[in-house]
Image: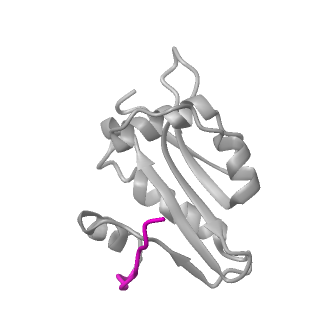
C-alpha cells in the first residue's frame, strides 16, 4: 500500500468498520466499531476520506477528516487522522484543504480547529492561525 496513489472522496459513503479501524490505528487505541456513516449524515457539514487502491484489495481508507457545524456561521474540524504508515506524505494537509474548500459556500464564515501543541505546525501548514481556546471536560 505504501507508494500507492491517493484519491480523495468528499461526502462519500463511509464504511464503519474501515473508518473505525483507521481511527484506532491513527490514535493508537482500539475501540468498538462506531456508526460513522449514520453520525456523519446526521451531524456533519462535510467529510473527506483519503483512499488508496493496491490492485489486489479494494479501496483502503488511509485518511479522514470531519467538519461539523453549529447550524450558523461556525464549522469545526474534527477527527483529522492519517494512517501512521502514510504520514508525512501530505495526505493530512490535502484532507484539510479539501474539507475547507467543501465548507466554503455553505453559509459558514469560520472553520475552527482545536489541537494539541505538537500539531501547531501541521495546522499552520493548513492555513490556520493559532488562537487561545478553552476546554471543559464533561
Q: Which residue lies furthest to the top in this view?
A: 56
Residue in view at x 49 percent, y 54 percent: 79
Q: Quadrant of residue 124?
A: bottom left
Q: In this view, does 52 lie to the left or right of 11?
A: left
Say how many tags the image has.
0
Q: Main secondary structure of the magenta part?
A: loop
Q: In this view, does 71 lie above or below 43?
A: below
Q: In this view, does 74 lie above or below 87?
A: below
Can residue 135 be found in the magenta stretch? Answer: yes
Q: Residue 75, how many percent across, how many down?
A: 61, 73
Residue 73 rendering spot, x and y as whole percentages: 67, 83
Looking at the image, which is closer to me, 95 or 28?
28
Horizontal side of residue 16 vs 120, given as left or right: right
Image coords of residue 59 (percent x, y): 57, 28
**Quadrant location of the N terminus?**
top left
Residue 82 in the image, given as x and y percentages of width and height: 40, 45
Magenta segment: 129-138
Q: Is residue 78 left or right of residue 75?
A: left
Q: Which residue is drawn at 41% across and 74% down?
A: 135
The structure residue drawn at horizontal position 25% and vertical position 69%, both measured from the top left corner, is 117
Query: Looking at the picture, does residue 3 appear above or below residue 135?
Result: above
Left or right of 121 in this view: 19? right
Q: Which of 86 and 24 is in front in this view?
A: 24
Which residue appears at 37% of the width and 53% of the height? Answer: 90
Please name the colour scheme applied to the rendered image.
one colour
| Magenta stretch encompasses residue 99 | no
Amino acid at each position: 500500500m505504501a507508494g500507492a496513489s491517493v484519491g480523495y472522496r468528499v461526502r462519500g459513503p463511509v464504511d464503519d468498520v474501515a473508518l473505525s479501524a483507521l481511527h484506532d490505528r491513527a490514535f493508537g487505541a482500539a475501540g468498538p466499531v462506531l456508526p460513522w456513516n449514520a453520525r456523519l449524515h446526521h451531524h456533519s457539514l462535510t467529510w473527506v476520506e483519503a483512499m488508496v487502491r493496491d490492485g489486489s484489495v479494494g479501496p483502503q481508507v488511509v485518511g479522514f477528516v470531519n467538519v461539523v457545524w453549529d447550524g450558523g456561521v461556525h464549522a469545526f474540524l474534527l477527527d483529522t487522522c492519517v494512517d501512521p504508515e502514510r504520514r508525512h506524505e501530505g495526505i493530512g494537509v490535502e484532507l484539510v484543504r479539501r474539507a475547507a474548500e467543501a465548507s466554503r459556500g455553505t453559509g459558514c464564515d469560520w472553520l475552527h480547529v482545536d489541537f494539541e501543541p505538537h500539531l501547531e505546525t501541521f495546522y499552520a501548514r493548513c492555513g490556520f492561525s493559532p488562537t487561545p481556546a478553552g476546554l471543559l471536560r464533561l
